[in-house]
Image (spheres, rainbow, N blue to C red):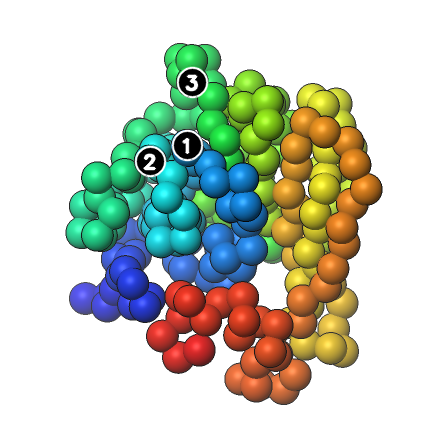
Amino acid sequence: MNKPFQFKEFSVNQDQCAMKIGTDGVLLGAWTSIESNPFSVLDIGAGTGVLSLMLAQRCDAQVIEALEIDDKAYEQCVENFEQSSWNDRLFCYHASLDEFAEEIEDTYDLIICNPPFYSEDYKTENVQRDLARFQDAMPFDHLLESVATLLSEEGSFSVVIPFSEEKQFITLARQVSLFPNRVLHIKGNPSVAIKRSLIEFTFTEQDVDISELIIETTRHNYTEDYINLTQDFYLKM
């Protein structure tokens, strides 16, 4: 039996999910700005529901809704929501982004997404894992079009993507009038290339605040920046 992943204020079962809890998601959930005090939050492609749970811990949003297409991941997300202390504010829809964007009339003050993307150049034999990991399941242009429909006028959208996709993603976003206002580049350690980009978009074009975060100096020696960002969540920080 896979043990739940234990955070400081909640735990996450992940034995039914193809994509397990990872650094990308935790960084995104911790970095995403809640300064505008969002009333409603949407988590696209929720998986275990970890991003929704992190935002429930961090902010007072009354509506935190998640969207998950995979049957098993959906069931697990619901279970994780139900056993959390914020279960009255959390809800998961079992639907595709297409269906959802067409049917929902409401907009959201904050949309967050850790989308599937190619971290390898080949597909494995595990279809569920591939669905979670590969961009075919949620192409970036399709994701951005749906976000532009579902985001409130003053709202913000935050996402984590491979650094190699950043320029293309920002170009696609501009086509639906979404503009970057904050970017965080993630490096595993000081001597490696930038691996991930965390980007926050709004409908207002402005100067972009770009910063960098290094996760560790040497193996398991975490940087102060990384500890400060994640210490409200990780037990050992």
Contact (CB < 8 A) between labels 3 and 1?
yes
- Can residue 40 be seen in this snapshot? yes
Q: Secondary structure at mark 2?
A: loop
Q: Residues within 10 Å of mark 1 (few under 14, many from 20)?
A: many
Q: Position of residue 21 (x, y in %)?
A: 41, 59
Tag 3 or tag 2, which sits nearer the N-term?
A: 2
- Can residue 76 be seen in this snapshot? no
**Residue 40 tag number:** 1
User: Residue 223 versus residue 126: which sits nearer the camera?
Assistant: 223
The residue that disc 3 covers is 106
Residue type of the residue flagged with mark 1:
Ser
Quarter holding the N terminus?
bottom left
Looking at the image, residue 52 lies above or below residue 237 = above
Q: Calculate the distance from the C-alpha at mark 2 to the C-alpha at mark 3.
A: 14 Å
Mark 2 vs mark 3: in front: 2
Q: Give the residue drawn at x 76%, y 54%.
A: 210
The residue that disc 2 covers is 62
Q: Position of residue 235 (x, y in %)?
A: 36, 75
User: Residue 12 versus residue 84: which sits nearer the camera?
Assistant: 84
Q: Position of residue 76 (x, y in %)?
A: 25, 47
Residue type of the residue flagged with mark 2:
Gln
Q: In the drawing, does residue 195 fall left or right of residue 171? A: left
Q: Calculate the distance from the C-alpha at mark 3 to the C-alpha at mark 1.
A: 10 Å
Contact (CB < 8 A) between labels 1 and 2?
yes
Residue type of the residue flagged with mark 3:
Asp
Q: Secondary structure at mark 1?
A: strand
